[in-house]
Image (tube, rainbow, N blue to C red):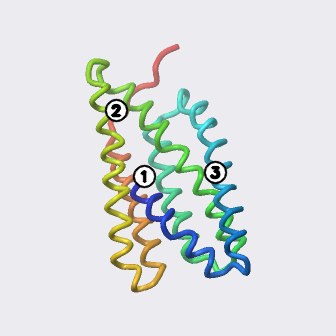
Amino acid sequence: MRSGSGTVDAYISVRIAQVATDPASAIGWILGGYGVVTTISTWLTGRIADRSDIVRLYTLGMLFGAIVTIGIMVSPWLWLIAVFALLRGIPTALARPLLVAHLARVVPHSYQTGVFGLFPTIGNVGGLIFPLLAAGVVGSGLWAAFAIGALGYAASVVSGARLERVPLPKE
């Protein structure tokens, strides 16, 4: 997840500046709105996760992240970029709570501390590599950086699809 979101975070302000008449204000409003959507979606994710297939929800969320990233890349109008940027708060909100909940279900208690320490480290590596890849290709156009961001989300889709499915806990 960090591989896609970190890349988009690095370039979304540049994309907004390409189409906005007042880029500084637009960037502030859009990123502030993204924070609101992420906060509300995180709370809803916690409510939904206890009653849902976490792996499916995570995988669909990351696919949605790839789609909205492409939407940001190809949108010709600021209002549409804003809509896609706000919607990006949904996969951001899904990632951490769903993966932590999944790990809590599948990792034996005696190993959880080590696994919970390793989990963000792997995400941070993706959050490092994909923005660097984007920096290497952005000379070809801003679209190339967003394509790398979409690939980062796609990598999360693939890894999410490989997670072990477990039955929901009985109440």
Task: Please say if 162 is above or below 143.
Answer: above
Task: Please say if 159 is above or below 15.
Answer: above
Coordinates of residue 74 in the picture (x, y in percent) = 57, 77
Q: Which mark is residue 35?
A: 3
Residue located 57% across and 75% down the image? 15
Task: Please say if 103 is above or below 159.
Answer: above
| Residue closer to the observer: 107 or 124 | 124
**Which badge, 2 or 1, comes first in the chain's sequence?**
1
Residue located 69% across and 74% down the image? 78
Q: CA–CA distance between discs 3 and 1?
A: 16 Å
Check if mark 2's residue and mark 3's residue have beta carbons within 8 Å. no
Q: Nearer the viewer, mark 2 or mark 1?
A: 2
- The quadrant holding residue 109 is top left
Locate residue 37 relative to residue 155 in the image: left or right. right
Task: Please say if 29 is above or below 144.
Answer: above
Instruction: Please state which amino acid type lies under the numbered disc 1.
Output: Met
What SS does tag 3 mark?
Answer: helix
